[in-house]
Amino acid sequence: MDDDEGQRLLAGASLRQGGFTILEADSGEQALKVFQQHQPDLVLLDVVMPGMDGFATCAALRGLAGDRNLPIVMVTGLDDVESIEQAYQAGATDFLTKPIQWLILHQRVRYILRASWTLRDLQNSEERFRTLVNAAGSVIMVLDRKGRVVEFNPVAERFFSLHRGGLVAADFADTLPVIGDWSALMGNPQSFESTIRALNGDEHILLWSLSGFADAEGVVAGLVIVGQDVTARRRAEESMRKLSYAIEQNPIAVLITDINGVIEYANPKFS
């Protein structure tokens, strides 16, 4: 968008050379209409305009885009810090200063688009991961190096008193073993089992796995903690143990065969 037809022609020629489809507007008001009709992938916006200037247009476009990751590049001859700051506050992604190097404009735009697409893919990946974590039936928590809660899923919230950015609550901290060397958990998860009392008062047996994760420099940054509720399994195992003991000690002979009559088990009394 530019009120200068010559600038629009030069920009259009450069961008078409790069394989882009161009939509033009000569005012802020027209730019908003074009955006609503066509939903472009990127907006190239001049700052100095009669009527609705570039800053106001940028803010309006950002509002129309909503949560969409829309790159807005502002073009200006104003190279003072105040104007640049105003552009970013209005929602600009990047800016270009005049005179523009038309021969490489399409390359700059392509770079900005790639960065935008990469960010979008990352956001989508994070959203998918968050959905999986929230849908998991296990307790999942992430702690930073200082033991502060970074993230947790709804299952963890049902069991413990948790607050993002705060230290782990005493009701959970008491279940953790003493960890002397966090780096030892990198690629070597530690497992343990504990009985906890949930917020509703019920007792549960959880099988825990603690794994360390690293930052960009490879230094241990925190822990991923996963707790699987094995209460039903452990109770079933205990019932089987009691039943087995009762059969072993039964004064009556007990014989178990398969459908073909082959003996599979006989208690001591049978012999």
Image (tube, helix red, strand yellow):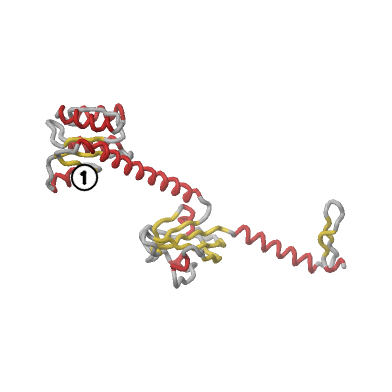
The quarter of the displayed image where residue 151 is located: bottom left
The answer to whether residue 141 is left or right of residue 55 is right
Q: Which residue is depicted at the point 82% across and 65% down? A: 267
Coordinates of residue 240 in the picture (x, y in percent):
71, 61
Q: Which residue is depicted at the point 38% across and 46% down? A: 122
Q: Residue furthest front?
A: 103
Give whichever of 11, 200 is nearer the camera.
Answer: 11
The quarter of the displayed image where residue 77 is located: top left
The answer to whether residue 216 is left or right of residue 109 is right
Coordinates of residue 94 in the picture (x, y in percent):
23, 43
Q: Give the quarter of the figure containing the C terminus.
A: bottom right
Q: Can residue 82 be seen in this view?
A: yes
Coordinates of residue 175 in the picture (x, y in percent):
49, 67
In the rendered image, which residue does mark 1 sit on?
Answer: 88
Position above or below: 206 against 9:
below
Tell me the element at label 1.
Answer: helix
The answer to whether residue 211 is left or right of residue 54 is right
Q: Residues within 10 Å of mark 1 (few under 14, many from 20)?
A: some
Q: Which residue is depicted at the point 44% across and 45% down? A: 128
Give whichever of 260, 17 is nearer the camera.
Answer: 17
Q: What residue type is labelled 1?
A: Tyr
Tag count = 1
Position above or below: 84 against 223:
above
Q: Is residue 203 visible?
A: no
Q: Give the quarter of the figure containing the N terminus.
A: top left
Coordinates of residue 218 in the picture (x, y in percent):
39, 62
Position above or below: 89 against 57:
below
Give whichever of 200, 128 is nearer the camera.
Answer: 128
